[in-house]
C-alpha cells in the first residue's frame, strides 16, 4: 500500500543514521518521503550510507548541529546510543535531570526548535528496566515537555517475519495528540522462513572452521558432536544450539557469538561464521546476489560491514512499523 502524506513532501531527518535503517524502512513502508539530511560520525557508516543514498547530506556530529542550520522536516528518526543519565551535579553538571549533555539531549535540543510532526526513536529494551529505567522516564518526560504525545513498545524481529530474536524498544511521538485509538504495535506476522531458509546456498570455504577448531570447541564447551538435520544457530556465548530454528540476536562480529552448524558432510562436522549477505538478510534486507537491496562499498571488509548489521535496524520490521503507524495518521 502506498501512503501519500496530505502535505507532500514528507521530509525526514535521519539521526544516528548507521547504514540508513530509517531510509530503507521508509522505502519499504510505502510512505512517500524525502530524506533531507542525516547525522552520523562513523566514517565507515557514512561511506556505506552515501554509497546507497549519494544525494543526502551528512550534518555530522549531532552535538555540533545548530538546529537553525537544518532545513525543516516532518519526522526525526534515530536509534541513539544511550548511557544512563546522572542526576543533577553528579558529573559536574555535564548531564542533568533533563538528559542535557547526552546524545538524547541533542535530539530534544533539535526537535524543540524544529518541531517535526513526528519522532521515531529506537533503543535496547534494557532501557525499561533496572538502572536505565530512570533514564527512560526522563526520555518520555522530555518528549512530553516539548509537546509530544508518546507511545512505546518492545518489538521482536521474529514476530514480524525475520527468523532472528531481536528485541528492541521503539518510541513514537506525535506533536500535539495521537488520535484516539492509535496503537503503534503492528499485528504480528508469520515467519518468512526459518534460519536455514535465510542462509546462502553456497557459503564460501573461508567461513568454515577446521575440524581441529571444532574439536577445540567441543573440548572447551563440553558438548557432543554437532549432528543436526538442518542448519541451526549455535550460541557460542551460552554454549548451546538453538533448536527453535531461528537466529540469536545479530551483533557486531567482534562480539563473535553466532555460529551456524550444518548437517555432517562426508563424515565431517560443519561449523561456520555467518556470511555478510546472511548478516544483512537477517536484518531484513533482500540479498539475492543479483539485486541486493543494499550495496557494499568495495573498500569495506567483513568486520566493518558486519558491525553495521549488528548495530542496525531490521528494515523489514521498520517498514511494517512505519506503514502501520502512518496508515493511521496520514
Ligand atoms: C545504534 S547505531 C544506529 C543504527 C542505525 N539506526 C541503522 O539502522 O544502521 C548508532 C549510531 O549513532 C552514531 N553516533 C554516535 N555518536 C554520534 C554523534 N555524536 N552524532 C551522530 N551520530 C552518532 C554511531 O556512529 C552509530 O552508527
Image: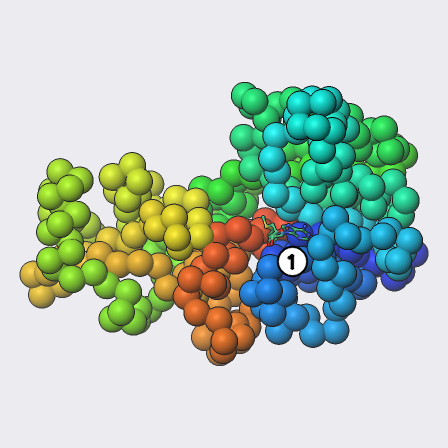
Nearer to me, 133 or 322: 133
Answer whether residue 287 is visible to the viewer in this image. Answer: yes
Q: Nearer the viewer, residue 326 or 166?
A: 166
* Percent x, y of residue 113: 90, 44
Q: Circle 1 is placed at which residue position?
A: 41
* Occupied quadrant, residue 150: top right
Question: Which of these two is toward me, 172 or 192?
Answer: 172
Q: Position of residue 318 (x, y in %)?
A: 63, 50
Residue at position x 72%, y 22% from top? 89
Q: Is residue 57 above or below residue 271?
A: below
Q: Is mark 1 within 8 Å of ligand 1?
A: yes
Vertical side of 174 occupied by 56: above or below: below
Q: Is residue 300 above or below residue 96?
A: below
Q: Residue at x 67, y 57 (%)?
A: 40
Res. 181 in view: no
- Residue plotted at (29% across, 71% down): 204
Position of 61 with respect to 74 (left or right) is: left
Count of all numbered marks drawn on residues in the image: 1
Secondary structure found at label 1: loop
The residue under the point 87% across, 33% down is 146
Q: Is residue 318 left or right of residue 271?
A: right
Amino acid at each position: 500500500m502506498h501512503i501519500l502524506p496530505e502535505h507532500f513532501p514528507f521530509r525526514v531527518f535521519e539521526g544516528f543514521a548507521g547504514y540508513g535503517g530509517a531510509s530503507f524502512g521508509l522505502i519499504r513502508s510505502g510512505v512517500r518521503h524525502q530524506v533531507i539530511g542525516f547525522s552520523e560520525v562513523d566514517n565507515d557508516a557514512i561511506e556505506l550510507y552515501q554509497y546507497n543514498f549519494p544525494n543526502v547530506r551528512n550534518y555530522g556530529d549531532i552535538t555540533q548541529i545548530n538546529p537553525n542550520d537544518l532545513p525543516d522536516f516532518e519526522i526525526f528518526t534515530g536509534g541513539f546510543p544511550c548511557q544512563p543519565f546522572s542526576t543533577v551535579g553528579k558529573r559536574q553538571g555535564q548531564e542533568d535531570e533533563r538528559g542535557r549533555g547526552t546524545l538524547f539531549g541533542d535530539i530534544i535540543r533539535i526537535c524543540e526548535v524544529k518541531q517535526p510532526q513526528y519522532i521515531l526513536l529506537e533503543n535496547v529494551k534494557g532501557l525499561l528496566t533496572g538502572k536505565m529505567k530512570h533514564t527512560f522516564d526522563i526520555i518520555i518526560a522530555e518528549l512530553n515537555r516539548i509537546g509530544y504525545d508518546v507511545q512505546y513498545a518492545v518489538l521482536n524481529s521474529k514476530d514480524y517475519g525475520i527468523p532472528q530474536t531481536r528485541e528492541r524498544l521503539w518510541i513514537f511521538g506525535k506533536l500535539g495528540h495521537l488520535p484516539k485509538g492509535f496503537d503503534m504495535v503492528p499485528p504480528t506476522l508469520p515467519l518468512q522462513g526459518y534460519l536455514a531458509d535465510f542462509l546462502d546456498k553456497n557459503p564460501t570455504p573461508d567461513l568454515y572452521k577446521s575440524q581441529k577448531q571444532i574439536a577445540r570447541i567441543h573440548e572447551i564447551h563440553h558438548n557432543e558432536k554437532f549432528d543436526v538435520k538442518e542448519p541451526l544457530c549455535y550460541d557460542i556465548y551460552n554454549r548451546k544450539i538453538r533448536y527453535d530454528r531461528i537466529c540469536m540476536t545479530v551483533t557486531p562480529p567482534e562480539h563473535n557469538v553466532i555460529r551456524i552448524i550444518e548437517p555432517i558432510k562426508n563424515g565431517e562436522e560443519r561449523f561456520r561464521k555467518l556470511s555478510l549477505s546472511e548478516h544483512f538478510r537477517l536484518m531484513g534486507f533482500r540479498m539475492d546476489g543479483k539485486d541486493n537491496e543494499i550495496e557494499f562499498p568495495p573498500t569495506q571488509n567483513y568486520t566493518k560491514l558486519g558491525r553495521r548489521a549488528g548495530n542496525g535496524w531490521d528494515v523489514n520490521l521498520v517498514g511494517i512499523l512505519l506503514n502501520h503507524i502512518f496508515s493511521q495518521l496520514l
